[in-house]
Image: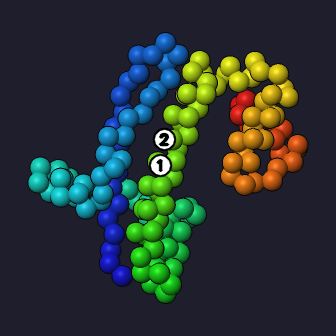
Amino acid sequence: MTRQRHFLFKVYFHSKRKNKAIKLYRPILHISRFEFAKFCEFWNLPILPDWTNIQFYYKRNRLRLQFLPYIQFFFNTNLFKKILQIQKIITMENKYFHLLIKKLFPWGLQCFFYFPKILQYRIVHNFLILFKRKISFNEIYMILCKIKK
């Protein structure tokens, strides 16, 4: 198995917002490890390994370093390609739903909670019917509780 390099690259910008929440910008999120390594090599930048990425103590690392390569080797050689495809589909769906929510609630999602309770339940119920999902009253109540948080 090939040895993988793990990169530690963090970019923080101080936020001057009123609520003083720190906003984290991730400008290289969509750059592959290979492209990033070539960028560092071109500009003679040091690559510092983050040793926590190779410790099996963390379940995420064990999945990424042992389980996924095992599945790829024995079951599906295109596993990582399929995972990337799923990620792209989910990203597109999230963008679509975000736009849909903006159109349905142009004043923000908080206006949803000013609707009468029965209308809130009906909106959630009809939305889930679109996905051909049967849902109970208690499940709708749980969803509304999660939305309020």
Left or right, 4 with respect to 79, comes to: left
Q: Are marks 2 and 1 in contact (CB under 8 Å)?
A: yes
* Residue extending furthest toward the bottom: 74
Residue 7 in view: yes
Query: What element does badge 2 sit on?
Result: helix
Query: Which residue position holds label 1?
Result: 91
Q: Which mark is residue 42?
A: none
Is the residue 121 above or below the residue 32 in the image? above
- Residue at horizontal 52%, vertical 47%? 93
| Percent of width and height locating residue 16 | 41, 16
Label 2, label 1: how far apart the Cα atoms are: 6 Å
Q: Secondary structure at mark 1?
A: helix
Q: Is 112 rendered above or below residue 4?
A: above
Instruction: Identify the amino acid type marked 1.
Output: Thr
Q: Residue furthest top?
A: 18
Residue 40 vs residue 99, the one in the foreground: 99
Image check: 127 left or right of 76? right
Classed neighbour count for the residue bearing mark 2: other residues with Cα under 10 Å, few (<14), some (14–19), many (≥20): few
Q: Residue 58 placed where, x, y %?
A: 56, 61
Residue drawn at (35%, 60%), measured in percent from left and top?
6
> Based on the displayed image, in which of its 4 quarters is residue 149 positioned?
top right
Image-quadrant location for residue 48: bottom left
Instruction: Report the disc number at residue 95.
Output: 2
For the point 44% across and 55% down, the residue is 88
Evaluate whether residue 70 shows in this view.
no
Disc 2 marks a residue whose amino acid type is: Lys
- 139 versus 100 height, above or below: below
